[in-house]
Image (cartoon, rainbow, N blue to C red):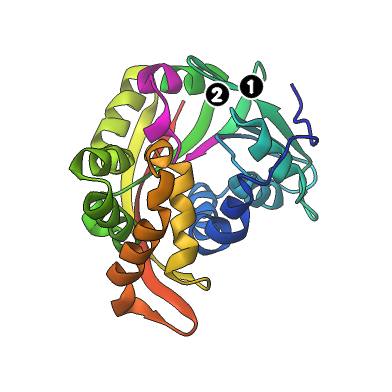
Amino acid sequence: MTADTSFDVSLVRPYQDILLPSIFQPWAEYMVEALAPALGTKALDVGTGPGTVARVLAKAVGPTGAVVGTDLNPAMLALAAELPALDGAPIQYVECGATPLHVSDQAFDLITMQQVLQFVPDRGAALAEMRRAARPGARIAIATWQPLHRNPLFRALHDAVATVLGPDKADLFEEPWSLPGVEVATLAKEAGFVDIELREWTLPATLPGGPDAICCLFDFSAVSPYIGSRRADLTAAVRANLAHCTDETGVHSETAVTLMTARA
């Protein structure tokens, strides 16, 4: 199904306006650079959200290539469609399933997934589905966050949740940072991928909106249903946790990722 641009994107817009340029765009560029796609490549981006990686792929594979971006959230796909690639391959945004993941019936030379595998209920099935969609010799790249101690911005949010909502809710927030790269590599091997490599990267990150801006992450996390009337308390706690790296231009910190690359 092609993305329907009529969906209300108001709830997901902070993802594009705040998180994408400061956090997700730099990682998209690093991931695509690591794969060095050839012109004319047919690429698939799994869990494309607002099209972060898809647009970088479209530029890299050029007008003779093609890109499909899939996501289970139709509002994210509608948001992605607002910013089409201007100087590269055409992008088709398609809604996909999550349980089980079903990405496309097409075959691809290149498949990417940025910070999505952590949230997929059956990770082994997700890798198997990516393997099914990969042509012989196709390459994949999967980026996952490193633990919270390597990601100070996210640790500040986690610690705020622990203080305001309690340790059980903090455990919910921590879950996406509990998937080690070695586990991703094992899943890829079990799915039939070969030439598996793991790389750890750290990049600087600056959020011009300051501590309040990064609090939009709460709305995309597992603690969202539990915030209720405590939003102001959470925001105040995040502000205090990030005071040491905040100035008039925003919050200055870093993010860290494990990138797994492999070949079908």
| Point 37% across, 39% down: residue | 226
Residue 162 horizontal/vertical position (percent) = 23, 50
| Point 52% across, 64% down: residue | 22
| Extreme-left residue of the structure | 167
Give the residues drawn in magenta, as a range.
Answer: 111-126
**Which label belongs to residue 134?**
2
Residue 228 location, quadrant: top left
Q: Disc 1 marks which residue?
A: 107
**SS for dot 2:** strand
Q: Quadrant of the N terminus?
A: top right
* Left or right side of 125 for 242: left
Whether residue 203 is situated above or below residue 148 in the rendered picture: below
| 1 or 2: tag closer to the N-terminus | 1
Other-residue count near label 1 (Cα within 10 Å), few / some / many at <14 / 14–19 / ≥20: some
| Extreme-front residue of the structure | 229
Residue 7 location, quadrant: top right
Q: Is 233 or 195 nearer to us in this picture? A: 233
Other-residue count near label 2 (Cα within 10 Å), few / some / many at <14 / 14–19 / ≥20: many
| Point 61% across, 49% down: residue | 52
* Left or right side of 23 for 51: right
